[in-house]
Amino acid sequence: MSEAGMSGTGMSEARLYRVALPMRIGFDHPAARRSTSDSLVLRLESDGASGIGECAPRAYVTGETSDGVVAALRRIPMEKLFERIRSLPPAELLGRLHEDGFAATFGIDGGNNLICLLETAVLDLIGHRLGVGAGELLPVPARPAPVPPASLPVSQVLDLSIGAEEFLDSRGPFHFVKIKASDDIERDVRTVTAIRDRLGDGVPLMVDANMSWTEGNAAANARRLRACGVDQVEEPLPRRSWDGLRALRRATGIGVMLDESVCTLDDARTAIAAEACDAVNVRVAKNGGLLNAARIVDHARAGGTAFQIGVQVAETGPLINAGRALAFRSPDALTVEAGQSDRFFPEMIVSPRPVVDRRTNTVAPAGGHGFGMRLNGAAEPWAVLVHREGRDPGWYPAPAAPRTPAPGPPLTTR
């Protein structure tokens, strides 16, 4: 069915896509290696309007998997979800979402990625109905943030699939560098030293250990890395090691950013109260949707804790522009990650494809209504389930479509 296939029918449909796009280049870090995407994309059609949402479950981050999210989605009473969408004018529904959150507004209990999948689709649909862009779908910050610029600089991530010299030669200009730790501290010291020598002292450097250090080696590792120019380490210890993280900060003076440890607002409150971090990495899918992510940003800002707007590796569509909407709401972020969809995917399932200006390594806000993109023909082969009103309740297999790659634009490698 085409994007506008149900326009004017008065009917509602939900279509689920399980997207495993091959990645032109892989991504490797201590917690996982990835050579394909792993996203769930949901399209909601209701009374002639449509919205698309996305989640990217990562078992090592939230404990969720795509199989688990699909199973949870099949238990959701979709008729009630559509009834709720139709029961309120879109502006009033958006106000309820801002005030009460998605789970309470729709009476849905679920994991972070299920909520993210549903919420982003509903927000996109509201954006199209109201004729507003992604930035207007977010609540005004509880504490005023700086006026966002026309574009935001983004960080560059060195994973374990390429060397430092290739990274330095091909990925600039550099505003903030994240280095994925290896299992060899000597290798990491050499990498940091090479980058610091080339970039000087003006570019912040962070090493992401992805929970791979122990309380026995963390302090020694942190001291070695700090001595050669690292400003922060991300998630150095097993998740929610509050006492160990506080001790590490006090013993070494190194900054600590938390990612996997902070999946909910309660996690953020606990981490900050425990003095376990200097910053938190906020990611839309990990944190249970755009609205929950915005609440974590507001809490961090109010307490003087820094934050990063991050991404899941290999986001394929709405998550990319949802994260950028959050970034432009939060221009005081320590740094912003833009992902590498332009490098990973010669073909994408959405049009227009999200853009990173690789001449400057900056991003601009998405244009258009909602998240400013639509599913294209490359999405249909990934459709797995469909739910339509007027049939027996439940989900049904989506009609099979041939998986023939469409030609994509030239891949930007700079």
Image (cartoon, rainbow, N blue to C red):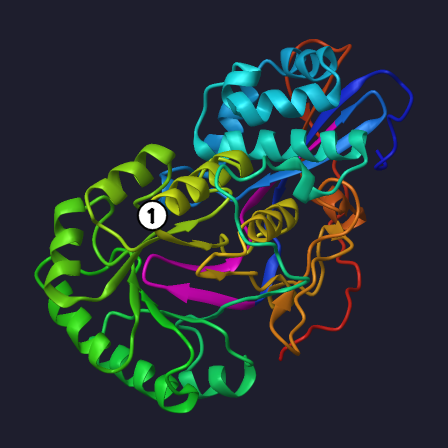
Q: Please, which residue is most extreme toward the left here? A: 216
Relative image position of residue 412 (x, y in whole percent): 68, 75
Relative image position of residue 187 (x, y in whole percent): 26, 81
> Does residue 396 appear anywhere in the picture?
yes
- Residue sitting nearer the eye, 24 or 41: 41
| Count of marks overlaid on the render | 1
> Does residue 214 appear anywhere in the picture?
no
Going by the numbered disc 1, the residue's amino acid type is Glu
Q: Main secondary structure of the magenta part?
A: strand
- Residue sitting nearer the eye, 2 or 369: 369
Magenta part of the protein: which range? 25-44
**Occupied quadrant, residue 147:** bottom right
Give the residue pinned by disc 1.
260
Name the residue located 67 percent from the left edge and 20 percent from the top edge: 93
Name the residue located 91 percent from the left edge and 21 percent from the top edge: 8
Relative image position of residue 250 (x, y in whole percent): 13, 60
Residue 19 colored in magenta in the image: no
Image quarter in which the N terminus is found: top right
As drawn, 185 above or below 366? below
152 sits to left or right of 251: right
SS of the residue at dot 1?
A: loop
Residue 41 colored in magenta in the image: yes
Name the residue located 68 percent from the left edge and 62 percent from the top edge: 150
- Residue sitting nearer the eye, 70 or 261: 261
